[in-house]
Amino acid sequence: NLTDRLADAFKKLRGKGKLTPADVDGTVREIRRALLDADVALDVVKDFTGRVRERALGDEVSKALNPAQQVVQIVNDELVTILGGQQRRLEFAKNPPTVIMLAGLQGAGKTTLAGKLAKWLAGEGHTPLLVAADLQRPNAVTQLQVVGEQAGVPVWAPEPGNGVGNPVKVAKDGVKEAQRRQYDTVIVDTAGRLGVDAELMKQASDIRKAIDPDEVLFVIDAMIGQDAVTTAKAFQDGVDFTGVVLTKLDGDARGGAALSVASVTGRPIMFASTGEGLDDFEPFHPDRMASRILDLGDILTLIEQAQKTFDEEEARKTAEKFATDTFTLEDFLSQMQQLKNMGSIKNMLGMLPGAKGMRQQLDNFDEREITRTEAIIQSMTPTERRQPRLLNGSRRLRIAKGSGMTVTEVNALVNRFEQAAKMMKTVAKGGVPQVPGMGPI
Ligand code: GDP
Ligand code: MG
């Protein structure tokens, strides 16, 4: 994939004190091939590699201590630029409701996105109303109703049994309904076709004219490859849009389409959809996407996710304990218990570079282990928990009996604790996020 190919391109530069123009050209050629193979549009690739080459041959690299790293940095910068630079947020209308219209091909993920967006907006304190203006497919309205129910957001839909119906009217009525009942945002789901066609464009464009939306989000499946650019251009000409939403980023495509669409249309990518569930959705950050493509690890996202589970203050205290050598078996136990809550830890690790070894350990990770650990530590006296050094043979025997474990198991636990404490002491000083209790990495 793109990430591996780019990594290969950089590998050859590693350890070079100075880069010759031939080195730079070789790398740029490989980047170019990797991007083309990942379905990035030719024009975009040309632009991109041109800028990378120019900068890589310039002063900032020749004067750098580590030229290879500098080139990675440049590639990263240029990726961010191509992906739209700054993150672009939704623009809310001064006079609510804010009207958001969705457009895109059939199967792109519009209806699913409508639910995700609605749920997300509700979570941010907004009061969204979903409007079912896709009257093309027989069950499109029902699908939005189901999604709305899951999101806990009301859905405006045409009366059933009223024949084919008029999507422009439904959209308009939906917006009126939102005004009347004082919803602050309206999300209008529209019909798509399997391919770009004139009738579809006209319908979407008529809806746009009728409801004058604050945002028109063009929803595109990141897996469609080369077609992404032509489809995006067709929608830009036919309906025009204010932002892009990439869906199915959970698939293999790691940004090829993303790279092209934003720079070809000049419209920012605003959201990313990464699965079928309503929570598989996030505001799009060009800088994070760039580092994900480069596999620098999506550290920021990782930290955000970790914070949901680990209380920040708690983490700070723990780090301090590690650093000052006052980490005890009680802390160890509470850390392990927190691990139980981290269901998504494997996903998180997927975002860290070089986390393969750790992921393997997690695969071996067994929740019963936590239960056994709990039993053993609870059979210790408070003093023993705070001063594991006291744990001599007879104490270990007593603990083993008390917890229904063997002395070997008690020994193993104490060893693991000591290893973890030692390892964490080292990393606490370096500030690298680590998962305690998992043994050496
Ligand atoms: P629409 O025709 O544009 O309204 O597309 P739908 O919302 O009906 O989605 C089409 C299919 O894609 C459904 O099976 C969705 O569950 C699926 N889907 C939507 N978004 C994503 C995503 O981000 N990842 C994955 N894997 N599937 C998605
Ligand atoms: Mg739909």
Image: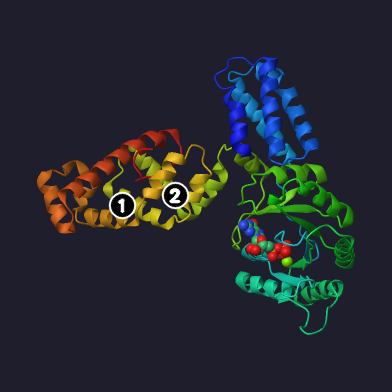
Give percent across and percent down for residue 407. Answer: 15, 49
Q: Quadrant of ligand 1?
A: bottom right
Q: Residues within 10 Å of mark 1 (few under 14, many from 20)?
A: many
Label 2, on which residue? 313
SS state under label 1: helix
Whole-Å distance between the Cαs marked 1 and 2? 18 Å
Q: Residues within 10 Å of mark 2 (few under 14, many from 20)?
A: few
Q: Is residue 133 left or right of residue 87?
A: right
Residue at 80% across, 51% down: 232
Q: Is residue 98 left or right of residue 363?
A: right
Q: Amino acid at mark 1?
A: Leu
Q: Quadrant of residue 9?
A: top right
SS state under label 2: helix
Give percent across and percent down for residue 20. Answer: 67, 14
Give percent across and percent down for residue 44. Answer: 78, 37
Residue at 52% across, 51% down: 305
Which label is found at residue 197?
A: none
Mark yes or no: residue 435 visible: no
